[in-house]
Image (spheres, rainbow, N blue to C red):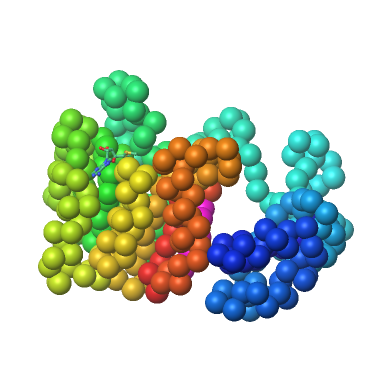
Amino acid sequence: MRAVCNMCRLCPQGAWQRLAAASQTAHIRSQRHARWPCAESRGYVTTVAATGTAPSSSVDTGGPSSASTDTDVSSGPSEQQPPEQQQQTKHMHMSEPLYAYLLQHTREPAVLAALRADTAAQFPAAARMAISPEQGAFLAWLLRTLQARRVIEVGVFTGYSSIALALALPPTGTLLACDRDPRSMALARDYWAKAGVADKVLERLGPAAATLDELLADPAQHGSYDFAFIDADKKGYRAYYEQLLQLVRPGGVIAIDNTLWYGRVADVENTDGATLALRELNAFLVADERIMFSLVPVGDGMCMCTKL
Ligand SMILES: C[S@@+](CC[C@H](N)C(=O)[O-])C[C@H]1O[C@@H](n2cnc3c(N)ncnc32)[C@H](O)[C@@H]1O
């Protein structure tokens, strides 16, 4: 294992690539990143499996990497695990039985289960665009924890995420729901009524960038939202993020869906437009000092951005 400074990986001087085969300690101590915060001072350090010729013991971050050599195995992976589950980093591949277990321990309101079924029947080719039940539960939990009242959603489809969000709002809360597709929006409208949240939802049909620009034209809207969720055209994400960063309050959160993109972001061979856009967005966000940032592996990845 060795530690890699995320900021240095993004360094426009390309120092990380040049130093990849050298000692990681030398890399971290490198003075080549005058404009980039150093790993040790900012804590932007993550552990990755060692590759190339770097000495595996060059840096001990005391993070997840130390679990494999820990003599107390009661709280971490044990040597009795099958080889395919033994890993250096503390992350997991979700097997079908484990995902079934996760769903068994997820609260999904009946109206959302019914919407999933209706969406699969009416939009069979696109049904997987809706967020997953555990993702809906996670967002609902977050909204309630934030005590959010004013929310914007970019990308409604048939309404799954909008209902998960709206149900977590207080009776006076509002969700501004933006989408350009009237057909899927019609099903969403039916389900807002069935879920009892129609009074909270303000529908905006049309291109989301134009809708957000209209909001930005009103100074009273600036900094007035507690939470925003982006789940639409991937190439538009960066522009939506910049618009929403002006619309959410300090301490407000922007959640951005699909940012691990079924693993495509990590596949260097993949250069399709959406993948490139998401890869660039992730690289931008991890270094954006206007926010607190965490990329969470729920669904197919969600960037969580808190406005500072
Ligand atoms: C992934 S789906 C949203 C899924 C939804 N959040 C859910 O959980 O069910 C993406 C949606 O974004 C909408 N969309 C794509 N590009 C858009 C744009 N430029 N403006 C507004 N909506 C857009 C599509 O019509 C589609 O309904």
Left or right: 47, with 94 as reference point: right
- Above/below status of 186 relative to 33: above
Question: Which quarter of the rendering shows the N terminus?
Answer: bottom right
The quadrant of the rendered image in which ligand 1 is seen is top left
Q: Is residue 294 above or below residue 189?
A: below
Q: Nearer the viewer, residue 143 or 34?
A: 34
Depth order, front residue of 216/152: 216
Q: Position of residue 42 (x, y in %)?
A: 60, 75
Residue at point 85% right, 59% down? 55
Q: Is residue 84 above or below residue 137?
A: above
Q: Based on the displayed image, in which of its 4 quarters is residue 172 positioned?
A: bottom left
The residue at the point 58 percent across, 30 percent down is 96
Residue 286 position in % (x across, y down):
50, 62
Magenta span covers which residues? 292-296
Q: Is residue 297 left or right of residue 244?
A: right
Q: Which image quadrant is residue 205 in?
A: top left
**What main secondary structure does the magenta stretch of the protein show?**
strand
